[in-house]
Amino acid sequence: MTDTIAALASGRPPAALAIIRISGPAAFAVVQQLAGRVPPPRRLSLCRLHHDGQLLDEALVAVFPGPASASGEDLAELHLHGGPAVVAGVLDAVTAQPGVRLAEPGEYTRRAFASGRMDLTQVEGLADLVSAETASQRDQALALAGGALGRLADQWRDRCLNVLAEAEAGLDFAEDEADVAERLDEAARDQLADMADELAALIADSARAMRIRDGLTIAVTGPPNVGKSSLVNALAMRDVAIVTAIPGTTRDAIEVPIDLNGVAAVLIDTAGLRDTDDPVEAIGIARARARAASADLVISVASAEAPQWTGDGALRLLNKCDLAAPDVPPDVLAVSATTGAGLPALRDWLSHWAHNLIRPGEPALLSHARHRAAFADAESALGDAAMASEPVLRAEALRAAAHAFGRIAGRVGVDDVLDRIFSRFCVGK
Ligand SMILES: Nc1nc2c(ncn2[C@@H]2O[C@H](COP(=O)(O)OP(=O)(O)OP(=O)(O)O)[C@@H](O)[C@H]2O)c(=O)[nH]1
Ligand SMILES: [K+]
Ligand SMILES: [Mg+2]
């Protein structure tokens, strides 16, 4: 018999409320034992929870009979007062019941997947939703958790299987019907080429989807002491990077997440670029150059006291404008990390740039490397199918394409990725 699992599903106590979830065949027996009754399904009922003759809490209890529950099994939720002693006492009482143990991270979701309540893309969407920090990450995660990609992959799988059915019918044509077979063959070839084109466009858009999830990278570069770290702190509104009057203060590349009007980005503070004999600083400078080379945006900073820019960042800033007022070239933003002058304009610039690149209103579905890989495999299989000289080879390539789409929803060939996907969840999810 399957274990019944229990865990704290809400945040760390103390809190106003704490929710313990219990899932599995013994879930309702546990409620009966602690509350003295099993309340009516799918609504909150006030219950006094006892264990060993001791009152543990007055709680709101809901039971959800399987299979129509979040985990697909009998599921109970205990909404407790969120004090550490209450939570510990109730968890101890729950796990003291026969057949009940503490849940592993992601185990509820794993059971929901195993029972067919969710496909694998919905599991990924749920994990993304729990870790979403910006509005665009949340929107994308909600679309994924709602099954949008799973449905798309299923439609594609059906299209492949339809062409496959036609291709297999073509295998049966007799010699004297060669011209019919020939015409069918040509139609299939065109159809497959169109499908491969459509897929290529979807795959090309996956870079955007992944950037929404991972955040855009913005490297802040320039000579020592121009105020790069000061600017990063000012933009992040947190004192993250060390600022001193000593040139060469920043060594390691420091990453600071920021929210650009709903789009996630990572600011990367870097070591000031100059010739140096200091081996540690030299490593920092090499890292700075590498981060700038791979960033989505490079901001080149100069000081108003000596307006010279190193490198060719897409955005040039003139910092320390409180100290001097030189001529500012038209494509340069004048700012002061100290007084905050020009920072609203800088934030606007960055938000516009991010929104143009990401287009957060347009759904982008292939947000995981796994999705992209499966679609790319399908695309190449469809290409093979279009080029196939023999109907048998075409059928084989079409089967490979359908299989690749089946991997997306987790219907086939995903055993190796399951542990990795579920390990992203916390206990209680
Ligand atoms: N007056 C004025 N001083 C600034 C401004 N921005 C930074 N500073 C000062 O300039 C000095 C260097 O600032 P940092 O932020 O450490 O400069 P950095 O470019 O990160 O320097 P490195 O990491 O050494 O390359 C510090 O003393 C800051 O207080 C500004 O806008 N106005
Ligand atoms: K400095
Ligand atoms: Mg610095």
Image: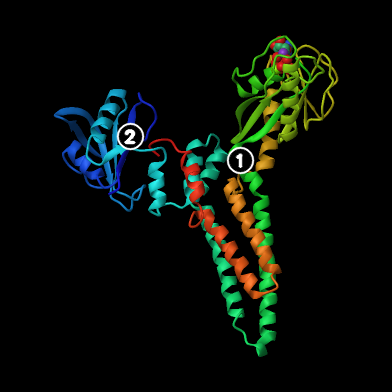
Picture layout, residue 369 above or below residue 59: below
Please say whether residue 405 is visible from this viewpoint. Answer: yes
Please say whether residue 227 is visible from this viewpoint. Answer: no
Residue, far bottom: 176
Picture layout, residue 288 above or below residue 206: above
* Residue 35 numbered tag: none
Residue drawn at (67%, 37%), measured in percent from left and top?
354
In this rendering, position of residue 314 left or right of residue 25: right
Secondary structure of the residue carrying numbered label 1: helix
- Classify residue 105 by image quadrant: top left
Quarter of the image for the C terminus: give it: top left
- The three-letter code of the residue at mark 1 reads Ile
Across and down, in percent, residue 123 comes to 47, 46
How crowded is the residue under tag 2: few (<14 C-alpha within 10 Å), some, or many (20+)? many
Residue drawn at (58%, 79%), measured in percent from left and top?
169
Residue closer to the observer: 320 or 416: 416
Residue drawn at (53%, 55%), measured in percent from left and top?
407
Q: Identify residue for label 2.
A: 19
In this rendering, position of residue 70 left or right of residue 40: right
* Residue 212 numbered tag: 1
Picture layout, residue 34 above or below residue 176: above
